[in-house]
Image (cartoon, rainbow, N blue to C red):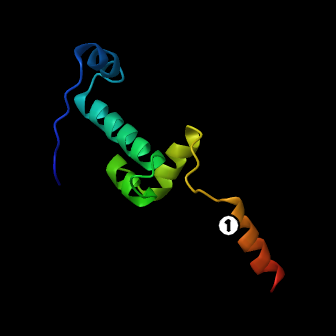
Amino acid sequence: MRSVSLAIPEDVFFEISSLSNRDTALIEKLQSCLAIGLFVAQEVSLSKAAQLSGQNIAQFMDTLNEIGIPSINYTEEMLADDLEFVSNR
């Protein structure tokens, strides 16, 4: 596993450090936020985002659901394809 260093302005660090009094919880929160952001930006897959967040896929999908972010991009075109497939059976 690789590590990266992140420079955070003091005032921002002060605000986010109030998320927890433990450094590990802060790191976990930052990892989760990074994973969510990369997933939403479509930079990483659902499974890679879950891995980055330290969760399994089901847990990460629950996390996304809790904050109102769809975990699957089910388009109208996909729905039309599925309906066509079902009607031809």
Where residue 62 appears, x then y in whole percent? 53, 48
Q: Nearer the viewer, residue 84 or 54?
A: 84
**Where does residue 60 sit, x and y in percent of width and height?**
46, 50
Looking at the picture, tell me which residue is in the foreground, 66 or 6: 6
Residue in the foreground of this view, choosing between 31 and 56: 31
Classify residue 80 by image quadrant.
bottom right
Q: Residue at x 41, y 56 (%)?
A: 56
Name which residue lies at 16% across and 36% down: 5
Q: Is residue 26 above or below residue 88?
A: above
Q: Residues within 10 Å of mark 1 (few under 14, many from 20)?
A: few
x then y, percent, for residue 68:
59, 40
Could you tell me which residue is drawn at 17 percent across and 54 percent down?
Answer: 1
Q: Which residue is outermost to the right?
A: 87
Please tell me whether mark 1 sits on a helix, a strand or a loop: helix
Q: Is residue 78 left or right of residue 41?
A: right
* Residue appearing at x 39%, y 55% in the figure: 44
Specify whether 74 is left or right of 47.
Answer: right
Q: Residue 34: x percent and y percent? A: 36, 40
The C terminus lies in quadrant: bottom right
The single residue placed furthest to the bottom in the displayed view is: 89
Q: How many marks?
A: 1
- What residue type is disc 1 on? Met
Residue most toward the front? Answer: 77
Which residue is disc 1 drawn over?
78
Q: Is residue 1 left or right of residue 22?
A: left
